[in-house]
Image (tube, rainbow, N blue to C red):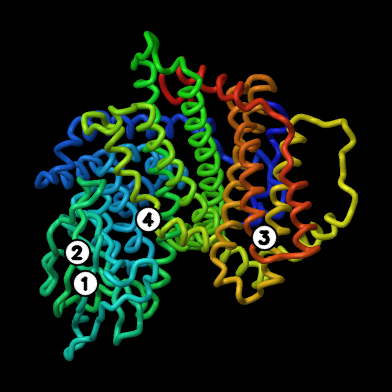
């Protein structure tokens, strides 16, 4: 490791990467996992291989008691309480280790959904917002899996508009209970959970969280839903008919339920990306094994360029997703440590850290779910006709993946949130977008800088990333100036800008990982990683250009339009690169290993 790697890098605030150059020494990459984290990773893989995957058909048939027993087994191995403090029966591990568990258990189909719901939305609301007595009562049993958790937010007429819920809560005459009336739908683990976090409006307008236990008077559930995928995941409706919930089961403050719901979603979005990444790796390995064994024209189909291209692109997307996920996880972990050091209790520390990086969590949710969808779709294509058969597990992976783009906020909502959060932080003075945007517009009027010709390693890639950011600032700044308050109604433009941001964040994360590995190993020892990072940068340059053009053409015209389109072309111009040969090198390494190599 060179002396340069000993530098102390400043950790950027949420969204700040958009206007500042990042350092490879600020990031965390999978190659940095310590021995204990590697053991956790192996334990998760072993659990899926021995306990879950051999019985996926039984799980899909919703065999009575099977899923709850698997959740309990995971609890016995400590996989449910990774980030729960030791005082409540957990392991008290850091955020990166907890993220690794989400990834490691992410390839278990319906089981992955059940365990993620339990450890996330089923447990965290009580852990982070519960009163001391509530935490003492519920968290130890949730940490071990003795009790299973679920979360009741969605209603038939309120999905993305969570605050439009109609379920009501009214204080009883004796003041001992809140009487809940209404229904919830699409409740994961709803058929077997013991503890539910349910949201209702007190007196018709105060959105509030409640802890509801199975068996409470007036609380019933509907039959299991029949779904396109994740068939083994229990999904039911919940009904509340004069349901009596003790006043001591109010979660947090009356009228502050939105704080619980939205803060938990920040963490849930990153966790979903991790689980999707784990699922993508499993599906990818299945496809590699098939490509190496399936013969056509007297040779394995992995010999053909069209298949090599697919294998390489799947690997690139997974590798980039890893890079962005653990970079963000490290930021959250660092912020949590900082807040703990300032005297914040553990719950406020993690919630504060997740809120700081809510922008990145939203982007990760979009990217991770779409990477998984891409990988399973190409996996089916590699399997050909067999991929359409239930006899091959890739068909199940294909069906199960689709839900990820819908829950934890649809990908459309998360794209809109990404831009909305950036703009709101700018308006509050937390993020200085105005001066960098003005500098970019000034640069457009000047003669382009062609450089000195004496470039150091990665200078070209770093300049390309910097230019991507300029393209975003130029487009977003002009759109806000032109449309002002009307921009909220221009969702197509906002989603174009969000896609530019997501691709840029991913590209920078990939480059930082490559730079850090090159520093650790020495230049020339990272051929595979260099091929993946540079191929991704080369490809996204055109994509960013397309999203930028679509946005600019939607709000600008005349000289303004022509100037910005010329600037966009300048900012997204990548050097010539033989991506075909790079993909062939990538696929050769992967096919030789017969698995994802990193």
Q: Do the residues labelled 4 and 1 touch (CB within 8 Å)?
A: no
Q: What element carries label 3?
A: helix
Q: Do the residues labelled 1 and 2 touch (CB within 8 Å)?
A: yes
Q: Is mark 1 on a helix, strand or loop?
A: strand
- What numbered label is drawn on residue 356? none
Q: Position of residue 441 (x, y in %)?
A: 80, 60
Callout 2: few (<14), some (14-19), or many (20+) C-alpha neighbours within 10 Å? Answer: many
* Residue tagged 4: 406
* Residue tagged 1: 183
* Residue tagged 2: 237
Q: Earlier in the sequence, mark 4 or mark 2?
A: 2
Q: Which of marks 1 and 2 is nearer the N terminus?
A: 1
Give whichever of 567, 315 is nearer the camera. Answer: 567
Tell me, yes or no, if residue 432 can be seen here.
no
Q: Kindly report which numbered mark, 4 or 3, lies closer to the viewer in this rendering.
A: 3
* Residue tagged 3: 553
Give whichever of 392, 340 is nearer the camera. Answer: 392
Q: Which of marks 4 and 3 is nearer the N terminus?
A: 4
Q: How far apart, in angstroms, are the residues tagged by discs 4 and 2?
A: 18 Å
Q: Do the residues labelled 4 and 2 touch (CB within 8 Å)?
A: no
């Amino acid at each position: 490791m060179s002396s340069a790697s000993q530098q102390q890098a400043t950790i950027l605030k949420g969204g700040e990467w958009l206007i500042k150059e990042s350092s490879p020494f600020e990031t965390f990459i999978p190659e940095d996992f310590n021995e204990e984290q590697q053991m956790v990773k192996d334990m998760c893989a072993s659990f899926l291989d021995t306990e879950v995957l051999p019985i996926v058909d039984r799980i899909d048939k919703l065999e009575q008691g099977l899923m709850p027993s698997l959740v309990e087994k995971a609890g016995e191995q400590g996989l449910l309480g990774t980030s729960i403090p030791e005082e409540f029966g957990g392991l008290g591990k850091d955020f990166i280790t907890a993220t690794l568990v989400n990834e490691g258990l992410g390839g278990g189909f319906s089981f992955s959904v059940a365990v993620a719901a339990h450890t996330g939305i089923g447990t965290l609301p009580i852990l982070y917002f519960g009163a001391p007595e509530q935490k003492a009562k519920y968290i130890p049993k949730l940490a071990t899996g003795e009790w299973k958790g679920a979360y009741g937010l969605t209603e038939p007429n309120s999905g993305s508009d969570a605050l439009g819920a109609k379920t009501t809560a009214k204080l009883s005459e004796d003041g001992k209970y809140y009487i809940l009336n209404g229904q919830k739908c699409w409740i994961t683990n709803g058929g077997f959970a013991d503890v539910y976090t349910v949201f209702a409006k007190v007196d018709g307008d105060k959105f509030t969280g409640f802890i509801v236990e199975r068996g409470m008077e007036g609380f019933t559930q509907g039959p299991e839903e029949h779904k396109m995928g994740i068939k083994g995941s229990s999904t039911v409706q919940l009904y509340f008919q004069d349901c009596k919930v003790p006043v001591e089961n109010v979660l947090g403050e009356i009228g502050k339920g939105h704080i619980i719901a939205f803060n938990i979603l920040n963490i849930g979005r990153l966790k979903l990306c991790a689980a999707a990444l784990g699922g993508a790796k499993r599906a990818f390995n299945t496809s590699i094994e098939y490509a190496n064994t399936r013969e056509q024209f007297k040779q394995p189909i992995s010999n053909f360029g069209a298949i090599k291209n697919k294998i390489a692109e799947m690997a690139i997307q997974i590798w980039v997703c890893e890079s962005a996920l653990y970079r963000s996880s490290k930021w959250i972990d660092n912020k949590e440590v900082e807040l703990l050091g300032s005297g914040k209790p553990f719950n406020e520390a993690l919630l504060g850290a997740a809120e700081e990086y809510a922008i990145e969590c939203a982007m990760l949710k979009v990217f991770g779910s779409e990477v998984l969808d891409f990988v399973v779709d190409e996996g089916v294509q590699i399997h050909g006709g067999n991929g359409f058969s239930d006899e091959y597990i890739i068909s199940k992976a294909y069906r199960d993946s689709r839900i990820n783009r819908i829950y934890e906020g649809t990908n459309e909502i998360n794209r809109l949130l990404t831009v909305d959060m950036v703009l709101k932080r700018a308006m509050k003075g937390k993020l200085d977008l105005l001066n960098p945007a003005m500098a970019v517009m000034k640069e457009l009027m000047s003669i382009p800088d062609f450089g000195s010709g004496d470039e150091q390693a990665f200078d070209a890639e770093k300049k390309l990333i910097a230019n991507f950011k300029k393209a975003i600032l130029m487009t977003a700044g002009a759109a806000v100036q032109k449309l002002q308050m009307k921009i909220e109604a221009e969702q197509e433009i906002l989603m174009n800008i969000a896609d530019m941001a997501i691709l840029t964040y991913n590209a920078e994360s990939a480059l930082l990982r490559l730079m850090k590995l090159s520093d650790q190993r020495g230049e020339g020892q990272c051929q595979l990683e260099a091929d993946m990072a540079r191929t991704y940068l080369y490809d996204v340059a055109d994509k960013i250009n397309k999203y930028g053009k679509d946005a600019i053409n939607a709000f600008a015209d005349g000289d303004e339009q022509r100037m910005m389109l010329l600037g966009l072309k300048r900012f997204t111009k990548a050097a010539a690169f033989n991506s075909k040969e790079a993909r062939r090198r990538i696929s050769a390494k992967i096919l030789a290993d017969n698995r994802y190599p990193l």
